[in-house]
Amino acid sequence: MDYTLESGVDPLREAINDSLTAFVERENKYLRSIGSELFPVADALKSFLIDSGKRFRPLFAAAGFVGSGGVLDQASINAVASIELVHVCALIHDDVMDGSDTRRGAPSIHKLFEKLHGDSSLKGSAQQFGVASAILLGDLALVWASKALHESGVAAQSLLRALPLYDEMRVELMAGQYLDVYEQALASESIERSLKVARFKSGKYSIERPLHFGASLSSGSNLEAYSGYGIPLGEAFQLRDDLLGVFGNPEQTGKPAGDDLREGKRTVLIAATLERSTPDVKARINSLLGKPDLSLDEVEELRSTITSSGAADFVESMITDLTNKSLHALETGTITSDAKSFLIHMADVATKRKY
């Protein structure tokens, strides 16, 4: 069966979900065969992977594939779906590093296994058990990502052409994650440094590299055009996330109100606020930022300070400028018309998510 971009995002997302479901069910049979101790691992990974997720990265990979002349069949759907498992690894580990209790409105993996420890009356530290379990589940998701790609059914020549870009994407993701941790420890106030984190932590691996990966599964063409589109759009995507991390509605984001403020995220939004603040206001921001027990009143205080400084408007203007730059890049290269239309729509989806 062949799939098309003209049918829209939802049918393609459904095909990706079907591929992921079939894969995780196959893998979970093996996990369960090892012993009943692995049942919670199998259940947690299946739920985390299947129950929610926008599938941005596989969708961009599919567009890169079609835009470079590929015809989507089940094998290529399986291949592009595999990068969602890279994303699962990143999310599980990110929640551990950030100390986030929730993800998508449910307990994060380390909190889920911390509770399992208590419910099962196990010995030792429940918190340490939860963190260790989450690290291992994230690692397993990363292993599964490679396994899903290798077993996708794509031609050997396509697989060999795609593997270097697949590997590069994962290297850049880990580098970006470290930069994020480092900038928080550094208490960075630099817009330029924060934008670099946005580029590597999310931007490149969310959009540019999936497009490259999809293209490499096809003819390998249009890589430069995809970079011109993907890098600025990826930065705009992360900047939108930064705004949502401060102003987002918990019912929409699945995270507590102001969670990025409690975690002390050193985003472009925070750097722009500090740049526009008096020494006294800057000192107050730094005293609250990263405070784990930040109250809702203090969240509102920081939100008000960010808004009144003009930083939120500044970031909104950056999102607009970066998105326009991204869309302009679609006029270069030899991207097929159906892929262009799809990518224009995806740019809108990625940057106009609501608070």
Image (cartoon, rainbow, N blue to C red):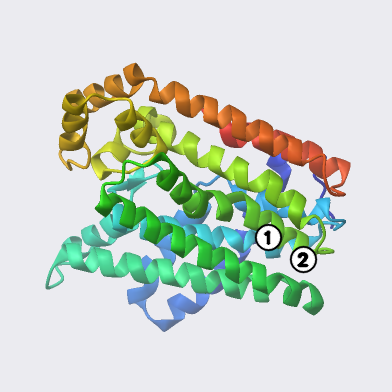
| Towards the viewer: 314 or 12 | 314
Whether tag 2 and tag 1 are in contact, CB under 8 A, the answer is: yes
Q: First in sequence: mark 2 or mark 1? A: 1
Local SS, label 1:
helix
- Quarter of the image with the N terminus is bottom right
| Towards the viewer: 294 or 81 | 294
Instruction: Give the x, y percent position of residue 171.
Output: 52, 68
Q: Is residue 150 above or below residue 251?
A: below
The residue to which callout 1 is attached is: 80
Tag 2: amino acid: Leu
Instruction: Give the x, y percent position of residue 230.
Output: 65, 47
The residue to which callout 2 is attached is: 217
Which of pointers 2 and 1 indicates the residue nearer the eye?
A: 2
Question: Which residue is found at the position 47% from the left and 53% from the top?
Answer: 201
Tag 1: amino acid: Val
Q: Specify whether residue 118 is in view.
A: yes
Q: Is residue 250 above or below residue 65?
A: above
Question: Which residue is found at the position 65% from the left and 67% from the top?
Answer: 165
